[in-house]
Amino acid sequence: MLVALVWGANFVVIDEGMDGVPPFLFLAMRFLLVAFPLVLFVPRPQAPWRAVVGVGVFMSLGQFGFLYLSLDLGMPAGLASLVLQAQVVFTIVIAAIVLGERSTRRQVIGVVLGTAGLVVVAVAHGLDAPVVPLLVCLLAALSWAVGNVVARGARISSGFSLVVWSALVVPLPCLAMSLVVDGPDEIGQALAGLGPTAVASTLYTALGASLLGYAIFNGLMARYPAGAVVPYILLVPPVGILTAWLVQDEVPGAMELAGGGVMLLGVALATINRRGARAARAQASSAAMAMRDSNDRIVSPPNLAE
């Protein structure tokens, strides 16, 4: 739940921090902080370089590059937290095409529902605001999905070392893009006028969302079945929408909320593994019983009569 809170609030933090800072420059700052100086101390992940670079290109550079750009173009932060969850639908479809993974009936129903909900959100948003930021945010979800498939195809466990080393891919392309799009003068002015909000946002996104968030999440994934951990990420959009409402007075329309609810229902059907959840509960129960037995042995006084 802590990860869901950190990741959900992340969208508003990014949006607030980009005030006066070009999006690609802001992204370069974030991933410079993620990669350095940790890359000097964290061992390289046990994976081919092409896989690490692929994850960096799609899961970090592509996902967040498009996300930052969509927010800069006017995408509401709360709605972005919802639309980005389309990556689950994209991942299932791409994995089926590229890796030949067979989808269960439950996943197919989830993909259909998720797509239908996404269409409703797109139509509702297009009635009130330009659709281009929404399409750019969908590209962020698509890039994230491709990164998921790259990691899965290379059998990379998304560990802390992968987060750190794949971050090396991001800063230089983002700085080059910012130089081309914004120019050196605007970059210089942004850096010279860097305010406390931008600094705090960079620290939050790098240390909180990237390092702390992924460290906790990957640790849980290593200890418990995925079906018991991944569904908690469905709390990210509600947290994002609530944070945007409290901080930025962003109130989504009824049609957007309805479409978002349908989309999240589809994502839940596609990701929640009831067997995994039951296995996790059984594992937790066994661990609790073992701990109680251990405590009883420790605190029970010896039987002197024996």
Image (cartoon, helix red, strand yellow):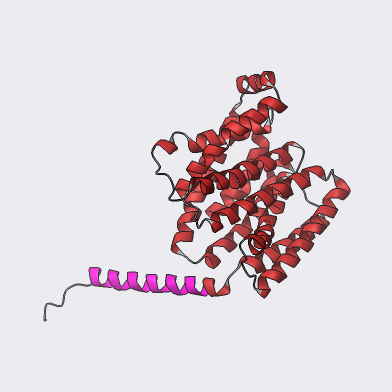
The residue lying furthest to the right in this view is 127
Q: Residue at x 36, y 74 (%)?
A: 289
Regarding residue 197, the answer to whether it shows in the image is no
Number of numbered callouts drawn: 0
Say which quarter of the image contains residue 101. bottom right
Q: Is residue 81 above or below residue 266?
A: above
Q: In the image, which residues are magenta? A: 277-298
Between 305 and 118, the one lying in front of the other is 118
Where residue 134 appears, as percent x and y from the top left, is 77, 47
Tell me if residue 285 is in the magenta stretch: yes
**Displayed quadrant of residue 287:** bottom left
Relative to 173, say whether 9 is above or below: below
Q: Position of residue 154 (x, y in %)?
A: 52, 55
Residue 191 belongs to the span the image colors magenta: no
- Residue sitting nearer the eye, 178 or 285: 178
Instruction: Left or right? Give the position of 20 relative to 274.
Output: right
Looking at the magenta stretch, what is its main secondary structure? helix
89 vs 227, left or right, is right
In-image side of 130 versus 86 (left or right): right
Vertical arrangement, residue 293 with respect to residue 167, above or below: below
